[in-house]
Amino acid sequence: MPGGRARSFRLGDRSELLVEHLLAGVAFTTRVPRQEDIGIDFMCSLITGSHGAGLIKAGPFFSVQAKSAPEPVVYQKPHELEWIMHQENPLLICVADRGASAMDVYSTWNLICAVQGGWNGQAPASRITLCPGESPNDWPGVRNNPDGSQDVLLGKPIIRVAHDHVFDENRTKEIAEVLEGWVAIDRENIVNRHAGLNWVVGPQTYETGRSLGGPHGGIFYWNPQNLEKSQVNLGRSATALWRVLQSLPEQRAMEPWKTGLPRLKELLQWLRQVDPNLAVFIGSLDN
């Protein structure tokens, strides 16, 4: 509006500026213009350290949504659900603490568990809500509600970043290492999903501000619609395993491959009939 701006908008603007300032210490950060805002505020590439004569390197890519408070983020309209269910990059929620000149960072890694599982293993959810700060009783932290909606419980922050941290090189390195571990898990799950490998791996426990350790848990999601992609992946994996074993003949005498090779060969003979395109990669099965 000419000559003024809503106070609530201005508070949000200041929160975004604070988040941008804090991110700049650990990532190359590009602000999304307001006219291009579709739910992401920043596109980031993690700073992974120095190389050569003080050169900082661009690392893993992720996106960020900045918030003024740890309130639930709701996706309910059809286009909103379509968008949040098909993220192709790790998404972090950064909640500004203006009074402390700091922010709390939340991973949305278990969003993919809600998407892959659907509502109670049935249809997609009618509403998906990301809940920063709400810790689950059951891993991986997806709550299926009676009304057909899902709550994705993001748990405690993965790290807290303060103004003083972004000017401390040792501290920014530690922050980047923590973020890198979370982004890597999210990236692996996203890539596997698009490849038709419907396994999701994530931390069962973690401490705010500490690099991911273990233990990690895994979940497998299956659906008859996955059959074609699973068949392709089986053929590719079996072929890759065969070629690796052929290139390392000394390994063939070792268990379990010594007894497993005949079974692998039998599988490949069948797979060549299912997918003739594999023949050129499998080669001869006579030895």
Image: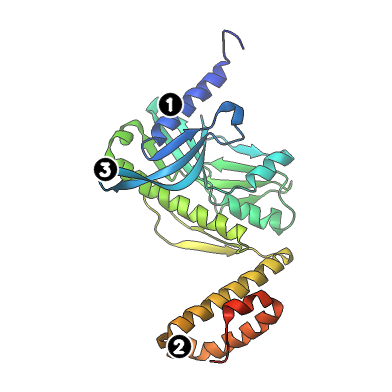
Labels 2 and 1 touching (C-beta < 8 A): no
Residue type at the position of mark 2: Arg
Helix, strand or loop at mark 2: helix
155 relative position to 178: left or right = right
The residue sitting at 65% across, 48% down in the picture is: 85
Image vertical order of residue 162 relative to residue 249, above or below:
above
Whether residue 138 is visible here, answered yes or no, is: no
- Location of the N terminus by quadrant is top right
Residue type at the position of mark 3: Gly
Q: Residues within 10 Å of mark 1 (few under 14, many from 20)?
A: some
- Say whether disc 2 or disc 1 marks the residue closer to the N-terminus: 1
Helix, strand or loop at mark 3: loop
> Quarter of the image holding residue 104?
top left
The answer for how far apart the CA atoms under marks 1 and 3 are is 32 Å
* Circle on res. 98: 1
Q: Nearer the viewer, residue 124 or 241?
A: 241
Residue type at the position of mark 1: Arg
The answer for how far apart the CA atoms under marks 2 and 1 are is 62 Å
Q: Measured from the top left, where is residue 278 in percent x and y?
A: 63, 76
Residue holding disc 2: 252
The nearer-to-camera label among 2 and 1 is 2
The residue sitting at 67% across, 72% down in the picture is: 231
- Say whether disc 2 or disc 3 marks the residue closer to the N-terminus: 3
The residue sitting at 59% across, 42% down in the picture is: 130
Residue holding disc 3: 54
Labels 1 and 3 touching (C-beta < 8 A): no
Helix, strand or loop at mark 1: helix
